[in-house]
Image: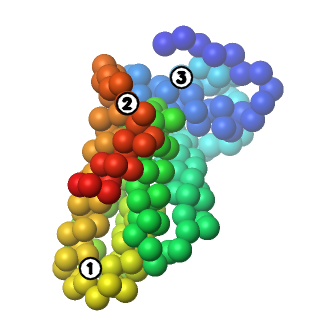
Amino acid sequence: MAEKSYHHGNLKEGLIEAGINLINEEGEKHFSLRRVAALCGVSNAAPYSHFKSKEELLKAMQNHVTDQFTAELKKSIKDEDLDSPTAIIKLGKCYVMFFIRNPQYFEFLFSQSLVRVDLNMNDDGANNYPPFELLRKLTFRVFRKMGMPKNEIKDIVISEWATVHGLAAILTMKGISYDYDWEQKIEDIIVHK
């Protein structure tokens, strides 16, 4: 792993991003505050000004990615009619495009079992992964207005999430090639699935 020297920017964010890269390259087994500090080119004590333990840094890393991801998803539907199926398409497209632009985040979140998703959808969703919960709530809102029964909507939520999550998984894999414009193709796939 190539070391990057820290250059007086935001140390906390630098530690978080270095930690994500370390986890992706070497796994959690080799993760430590000392190793992350070395990647940032700072003293072994420097990370402790922001994080009490490696577990606290891991949680901050997960929150960092989740917060960015959720904000991007919300922004994608901000001006959209939230009772329209078009909002679901925009949200799904944004889901995939976020990970195309940030493949390291997909690997970090989903290869480490950091995300909790309850596909039963029988509670308020407070413990679900926020991006999934956003998709679930929007889908329920749109299809309830159409008079669709709850169990059918649940199936649609699972299908929508499987589609966008599966596309994100494929498109963040190394060695995948495809000659078309993914931004347009993602929308076509979501609409025609």
Q: Nearer the viewer, residue 16 or 130?
A: 130
Write the residue at 45% across / 36% down: 100
Residue nearest the observer in this picture, 125 or 136? 136
Q: Position of residue 21 (x, y in %)?
A: 49, 27
Q: Is residue 151 visible?
A: yes
42 sits left or right of 57 in the view: right
Whether residue 11 is situated above or below residue 7 in the rendered picture = below
User: Which amino acid does the dot numbered 2 rest on?
Assistant: Tyr
Residue with the mark numbered 3: 35
Q: Is residue 130 left or right of residue 189?
A: right
Relative image position of residue 141 (x, y in whole percent): 40, 80
Tell me how far mark 2 sits from mark 1, CA to CA: 39 Å
**Which residue is painted at 43% across and 51% down in the image?**
93
Q: Which residue corresponds to mark 2?
A: 180
Q: Quadrant of residue 11?
A: top right
User: Which image quarter: residue 14?
Assistant: top right
Disc 1 crowd rating (10 Å Cα; few below 14, some 14-19, many 20+) is few
Give amino acid for label 1. Answer: Asn
Looking at the rendered structure, the secondary structure element under dot 1 is loop
Which residue appears at 41% of the width and 36% of the height?
Answer: 182
Residue 43: x %, y % from top left? 69, 22
Residue contact between numbered discs 1 and 3, judged by CB atoms under 8 Å: no
- Residue with the mark numbered 1: 122
On-image quarter of the C terminus: bottom left
Q: On the rendered structure, is 48 left or right of 23?
A: right
Name the front one of labels 1 and 3.
1
Against 108, residue 187 (above or below) is below
Q: CA distance from mark 1 to mark 3?
A: 42 Å
Q: Secondary structure at mark 2?
A: loop
Closer to the chain start, of discs 1 and 3, is 3
Q: Compare residues 119 and 113 and report the one nearer the observer.
A: 119
Closer to the camera: disc 2 or disc 1? 2
